[in-house]
Amino acid sequence: MGGFEIVQPGRRRIPVDIKAEAWAWMDRVESGKLRAADSLLAKQREQGYWIGDLTADVSLEADYVLLQLWLHQPDGPGWDPPERGRILKCARAILDRQLPDGGWALYPGAGADINLTVKAYTALKLAGVSPDSEPMLRARAAAWRLGGVQECNSYTRINLSLFGLFPDKYVPTVPPEIVVLPGNVPSEMSSWTRAIVVPLSVVQAAGRKRRAPEGFTLDELFLPGKKLSLASREGLAFLVHYVDRLVKIWDKRGFKNLRATALREAEKWMLDHTRYSDGLGAIYPSMMYFIMALDSLGYPADHPDLAEAIRHLDNLIVERDGKFFFQPCVSPVWDTAIAAYALGEAGRGNAEEMRRAADWLISKEVRHRGDWSVKRPLLEPSGWAFEFANEFYPDIDDTAMVLLAFCHAKASDPARQDRVVRRAANWLLGMQSKDGGWAAFDVDNDWQILNRLPFADHNAMLDPTCPDITGRVLEALVRQGLGAGHDAIRNAARYLMGCQERDGSWYGRWGVNYVYGTFLALRGLAASRDVNARPSIAKGAAWLRDTQNRDGGWGESCASYAKGQFVPAASTPSQTAWALLGLTAAGDGGSPAARRGVDFLLSQQTGEGAWNESLATGTGFPNVFYLNYHLYRHYFPLMALAAVR
C-alpha cells in the first residue's frame, strides 16, 4: 500500500497512495469542470444570452401541415399550397422519426402513440405520400393496433373535425361564452390552457369550416367494428357525455346576441394578450389556433395582426445542417439564467461575460400586469418569462432561476439590479399559494371541477403547486437573503415535507420526473435550514442512492408519469447531474454513490467539454408532451461538477 505520511500525534494517518489517488481524482473533476465551463461560455451570444434548441415530437410538424390546409384551401382535385416546399420538409422530418412498428412516439424510447400516429399519417397523406406506400401501410397497421382513430384524444379529434375528417358529434365543443361567464373562468384554467381554449372556441364557433382536398378521407384509419364515442377519462364517461350534450345544445340554440358578445370579447382577449409578446402565449398550440381564429373572424391575409401572428409561428422553425423541425417555443431566459448560475457556481466566467448576461436578463424583466394579477391585483409586476417576450405570463420557475443567477452575475448598474431583485423577490412571495407551494404561472389554480370538462384530457387543465418549482423558489429566496425564519420559508418547507412520496422521492412536474423533483426538493429543504426537514432530506438522499444505475449514472423514463412511480432508463448526463446536485445538497456529495456519478459524467464528457444526450428529460404535459432541452446536457453537469468539487 506504500508508506504513511507523517502527521501530528493523535491524528489519523492517511496512506500516501490513497491521498495521491484522491488528489488525482479531484484534478480530473477540476479539469472536467473547466472544460465544461469553457464549452458553455463559447455558446454565449454577443447580446449576453444563451439559447439552446428545444425539441419535441412530430405533432408540431404535423399540425403545421393542417394549418396550411386551413389557410390555403384546395381549389379542386389535389392541393398545391404556397408553402409546398416547407410541407415536404415537414413530411421528411416526420418520416425520419417513424418507428419500426409503423407508429410515432411521444419521446425517444417509447412505443407508438395513437394521437401522434394519426396526426403523422394525416400530414403525410396531405403532403402527397401515397397511402399504398410502405411507410403508410405500416402506419395504418400501427393505428389499427392502437385502436384506430376512435382512441384519439379531444384535441386530435378537434383538429380533424375542422376539415370534416372526424364527426362533430363525437368532438367536444369549446364555447366562446367561457370568456363572459361570471367568475372569470379562464383565469381558473392553467395559463397555457386558456391561451389555447380561447382561440379554439372562436375557431369552432365562427362556423367557417374548411375542407380537405377532394376525395381525401381518413376512413382507412378507423378500426372496423369499433363504435365511436366521446373521448373520456376513466370513470367519467357519462359525465363527459352529458356536459358535452348540454354545450352542443347551447351551441345550436343559445342566444345569438350572447354568442356575438362572446366572440367579440374572445377576439379582444386574444388581441390584448399578444401585446408585449412573441405571439399569443408564445407557445406553438395557442399561436396556431390564434392564426386560425383570426382567419375565422374574416381577417384578410394582409392584415397586420394576422401577418404578425404567422411571422411569430414561423420563427419557431429551425432549419440547420440539413435538419428541419419546429420548436414548441424558445427558452432564452431559462437557458441564460441556468448557464450563468452554473458558471458562477463553477467560479468561471469573467466579469464582462457575466455582466452581459446580467444586463440582458435585467432588460427582460416583466413590468406589465399579466393574467396572474386577476388574483393578485395589488402585487407590483416583476418576474421573467421563459421566452424573449411573453409579458402576460411571467414564469415563477424562471424568476427563481434568474434570482439564483444574480447571486453571481453582476450588472453594469448595481443599483438597478438591486431594485430588480427586490421587486422579483416580492413578486415571488406574493405568488405563493395557500398550501405553501408555488406553481408555474398562477396562484391557487386548483379548480378540480375543470378537469371534468370534455376537452380536459390533455392532462394540464390546471397549474397546481409542485415540489420542483417550490424547491427552486425556496433556494432562490434564501440565497437572496430571506431569513430561514420567514413564514414563507417555513410554509414552503412544510409543503415539501408534506408531499414527499413514501419511498423518499418527490414528484417532478417540469422535468423527468422523480429524480428532477427530488433534487430540487432537497436543495430547497437544505436551504431552508428547517431542523424538522432532516429526516426528509436523509430519506430523499437514500432514494437517490438506491436508484443509481450500475454504470454510476442516473436515468429515468418518461413512463414514470404513466406508472406513477420511478421507471429506470439509460443514464443521461442531465439526470445524473440532478441526482448529484440532490446528494450534495443533502450533505452526501462525498459518498461512493456521488463519486461513481461523477466518474460517469467524466467518462461521458466529449473532447469539447460537453455531453451528448438524446433522451427527453423535460416535461410539457405529463403523458402527453415531452421536451428535449439541448443545453441541459451542458449546464447541469457543469453545475454538478462544481458542487462536488
Image (cartoon, helix red, strand yellow):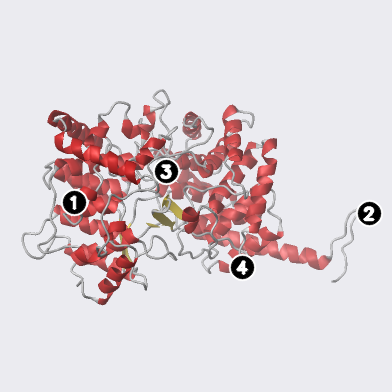
Viewer-closest of 168 and 375: 168
Q: Earlier in the sequence, mark 3 or mark 1?
A: 1
The residue shown at (32%, 62%) is 147
**Foreground tag (4 vs 3):** 4
Q: Which residue position is annotated with label 2?
A: 9
Q: Earlier in the sequence, mark 2 or mark 1?
A: 2
Viewer-closest of 521 and 597: 521
**Foreground tag (2 vs 4):** 4
User: In the drawing, what numbered circle is on residue 360?
Assistant: 3
Viewer-closest of 330 and 562: 562
Q: Residues within 10 Å of mark 2 (few under 14, many from 20)?
A: few
Name the residue type under label 1.
Leu
User: Which residue is outermost to the bottom?
Assistant: 134
Distance from the alpha carbon under mark 2 to that under mark 1: 84 Å
Viewer-closest of 30 and 326: 326
Apparent side of residue 301 relative to residue 433 in the rendered image (left or right): left
Q: Earlier in the sequence, mark 4 or mark 1?
A: 1
